[in-house]
Image (cartoon, helix red, strand yellow):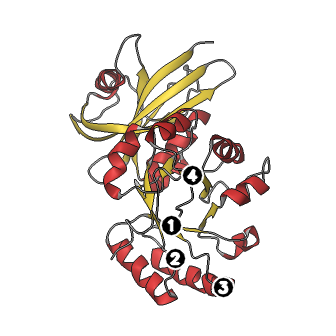
Amino acid sequence: MKRIHVAAAVIRGADGQILLAKRPEDKHQGGLWEFPGGKVEPGERVQAALARELEEELGIRPTAARPLIQVRHDYPDKQVLLDVWEVSAFVGEPHGAEGQPLAWVSPRQLGDYEFPAANRPIVAAARLPERYLITPEGLSGPELLRGIQTALENGIGLLQLRAPTLPAAQYRDIAADALGLCAGKAQLMLKGPLEWLDDFPAAGWHLTAQQLRESSGGARPLSAQRWLAASCHSAQELALAAQMGVDFVTLSPVQATRTHPGAQPLGWAQVAELLQGFNQPAYLLGGVTPADAERAWQVGAQGVAGIRAFWPQ
């Protein structure tokens, strides 16, 4: 069965809202909401296909677009490759040129809409920012909380409280305070034993590679309403993460780092290869800085993650 190549767009308005279209009842997956787009013709460039489809469907012409995520999905009756781009600027006023209903929704509201199964990773990618901040080791509780406060003021929308050397009780106290700081501003990801999950219902959870391997083949440990991430370093770990249904991963180390001098860097070419078959958003970690976001998008990543290079000085 030939895989159908589809160009799709996550279109963001100036206010950050995202444009959705409803599929006609008589089409495949009819009646569900989708990100606008359509088939790439043989020999056609993806960007050209996207521009053509958005003009035909919505009467707009994209003026700023970048790769967001590629998703391969097998339905019982067809196989698709969704080549998704983020469109951040366009000319024209979007309207349902083919009579389809449209809706502008906030990223947070995306979870309230029903999409085809292949769109689940796109919904995650549309809701996630391009940077993922991980807290540095060796800081006291007050230093961590001050840094988190500054990071939030600087616009960080996703951060992980990582403090492997702190005693469990102290980590939990800081986690409770950090959740208070992040409420309504950013998504906080915690690390630790899965027995803690119910104690922090507002937090997402970031699994270590060891936790991922230990629960190999196991069910997703928390509800679909909460963010679940995992640390990955190989094709095998990416496969385990996909099997568990995580929402996103970190893939590392891209380059040599001072914090893990013994770890063999993957390099950009291998990262691109690993992400080819991976359908979830991935943040690249290890020897990268916020300036590498563009390069990360080009190899198929959601963005970049970091510790020192991202921590407010």
- Residue identified by numbered label 1: 259
Q: Residues within 10 Å of mark 4 (few under 14, many from 20)?
A: many
How far apart marks 3 and 1 lie (CA) works out to 21 Å
Q: Secondary structure at mark 2?
A: loop
Residue depicted at 56% across the width and 26% down the height: 30
Is 65 situated left or right of 92 in this image?
right
Q: Which residue is mark 4?
A: 249
Q: Kindly indicate whether the residue at mark 2 contacts the one at mark 4 (C-beta within 8 angstroms).
A: no
Number of numbered discs on residues: 4
Residue at mark 4 to residue at mark 2: CA–CA distance: 20 Å
Q: Residue at position x 75%, y 53% from top? A: 213
Tell me the number on the disc at residue 137. 2
For mark 2, does the 10 Å Cα neighbourhood hold few (<14), some (14 to 19), or many (20 or more) residues? some
In the image, residue 284 sits, relative to residue 189, either above or below, namely above
Q: Earlier in the sequence, mark 3 or mark 1?
A: 3
Q: Quadrant of residue 98?
A: top left
The residue pinned by badge 3 equals: 167
Identified by mark 3, the residue type is Pro
Residue in the foreground of this view, choosing between 85 and 13: 85
